[in-house]
Image: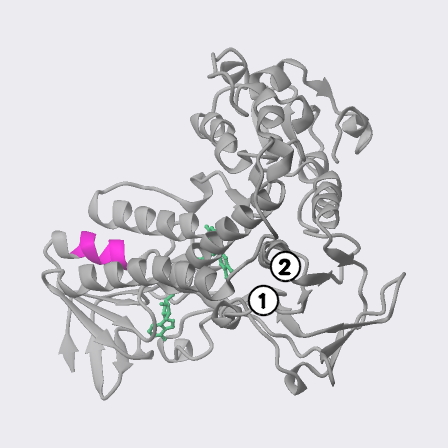
Amino acid sequence: MTRFDAIIIGAGQAGPPLAGRLTSAGMSVAFVERGLFGGTCVNTGCMPTKTLVASAMAAHVARRAADYGVSVGGAIEVDMARVKARADSVATNARTGVERRLRSLPHCTVIDGHARFEGRDSVHVGGGVLTAPRIFVNVGGRASVPELLGVRDVAFLTNSSILALDRVPEHLVVVGGSYVGLEFGQMYRRFGAEVTIVEKAPRLVPREDEDVSEAIRGILEGEGVTVRTGAECIRFASHERGVAVGVDCAEGEPLVVGSHVLVAVGRRPNTDDLGLDRAGIVTDARGYIVVDDELATNVPGIWALGDCNGRGAFTHTAYNDFEIVAANLLDGERRRVSDRVPAYALYIDPPLGRVGMTESQARASGRPLLVGTRPMARVGRAVEKGETKGFMKVIADAETRRILGASILGTGGDEAIHGVIDVMNAGVPYDVLERSVPIHPTVSELIPTMLSEMRPAGRPGEHRGSADRS
Ligand SMILES: Cc1cc2nc3c(=O)[nH]c(=O)nc-3n(C[C@H](O)[C@H](O)[C@H](O)COP(=O)(O)OP(=O)(O)OC[C@H]3O[C@@H](n4cnc5c(N)ncnc54)[C@H](O)[C@@H]3O)c2cc1C
């Protein structure tokens, strides 16, 4: 049995920086990782996918070159092996960087292997047992593959295995019309595949507002992606041309035959093989580790950070979990998860930048609301760039004049949303942003204009008519 001051399980987004802070504070740390250093974001999530999205964007712009008065000789070809090599190299560089830094960290012992709790202060790895008074769980999650009819009888892809493709599939069927599925769907369409996105709900990204879902559908269909929503009873069977996916949608063919199928219907935490019961750590019905507002589990001395605690599903939320735990443990602060303003982006092109409540959540809260919208077709920078698809929308409390949420679906939306994020974090009325002097020409410069045109919220979707969502 080897004793340490702290054990960290999982080298995702929270564990490695935490190891740096703990060792700097003089603690000895045992760091256990069973797979690829850097975890999901670096190896099978954000980094490879955003690198692929950039390649897909290059193909898309090349095809549209004539719109900009530029001639490209011949047909646009995508060399998928080189596209893949580029994504691999970005992920590999990041992974080796994380691993090198951890292995060279003084007072940090890196142990390769699968960690399993033995008790409240002990963890089994390989042939040995580690003990520590503080244990930090940062085990992340993986693609969830529910028991859909026939799914185990066919060769399906997940967000991890699809990264091994070095040829463009003839027809990619994406089961799941949410964040992961839409990014892969649009990207592969731009690489040249026929793409069908199958979604069980009546609309894509059902967590977003209906007008956002509709606009996204329009963008994807405009590029030739087939969208099948309201797909009840999704089922799979082998077919001579690949995989037949039964969709039973309200309209259209009941069967879609693809050469490849991506299952992107959600994520599940890596907590089922962690021996949590031996430590008495409580999880919720879906396996997420239950934590308090400071990320402590029900067992004193054990914390859970990142995707495995169900309090966030992003790299920035996992990293913020590290910041909260480090500040509270080492700096005498009292930071909390509930202090953070939720924000994220969907990296289709144009991207969707999001912060705070959706309009429907704000309406459900029952407060008096002000809503402002602006189509990207009326944003100078978007017009100049020839990228006028999408719209922006902001919702504020009519009494406090605080912004409750915003969506920017449009070119640069993932960056422009940060002005709104900053104002929400500052906790000031939107007038501060409205009176700012933004740079011209930017997408952000139209946010103050939109704020100056805020109107009381009418019936749901009433303000939609003003925006060209094409
Ligand atoms: C396709 C895709 C695209 C994404 N794009 C974005 C994006 O653009 N922006 C964004 O913010 N987020 C994105 N995400 C989400 C993001 O990747 C995750 O939120 C983030 O990686 C979570 O980090 P984490 O530290 O909680 O866990 P992870 O990064 O999953 O790391 C967990 C680590 O723990 C290790 N581990 C697990 N169990 C054990 C064990 N028992 N013993 C030892 N080690 C163990 C794993 O091997 C892994 O290395 C994306 C996710 C996917 C799937």
The answer to whether residue 375 is seen in the rendering is no
**Residue name at image x 48 percent, y 27 percent:** 419
| The C terminus, quarter of image | top right
Above or below residue 323? Residue 445 is above
User: In the rendered structure, are the residues bearing label 1 and label 2 in contact, judged by CB atoms less than 8 Å apart?
Assistant: yes
| Amino acid type, mark 2 | Gly
Above or below residue 449? Residue 16 is below
Most foreground residue, 109 or 182: 182
Judge left or right: residue 112 versus residue 362: left
Q: Report the residue marked by disc 1.
A: 168
Location of residue 9 (image quadrant): bottom left
Label 1 CA crowd tier, 10 Å (few <14, some 14–19, many 20+):
some
Q: Which mark is residue 113?
A: none
Name, please, the residue furthest toward the right.
Answer: 251
**Residue name at image x 85 percent, y 69 percent:** 248
Q: Report the residue marked by disc 2.
A: 192
Judge left or right: residue 130 versus residue 250: left
Q: Is mark 2 within 8 Å of ligand 1?
A: no
Q: Is residue 17 magenta?
A: yes
| Amino acid type, mark 1 | Val
Magenta stretch, main secondary structure, is: helix
| Real-space Cα separation, disc 1 to disc 2, in angstroms | 7 Å
Most foreground residue, 27 or 194: 194
What stretch of residues is rendered in magenta?
16-22
Above or below residue 442? Residue 295 is below
| The N terminus, quarter of image | bottom left
Label 2 CA crowd tier, 10 Å (few <14, some 14–19, many 20+):
some
Location of residue 366 (image quadrant): top right
Of the residues under marks 1 and 2, which one precedes in the sequence?
Answer: 1
Q: Secondary structure at mark 1?
A: loop
Most foreground residue, 60 or 66: 66
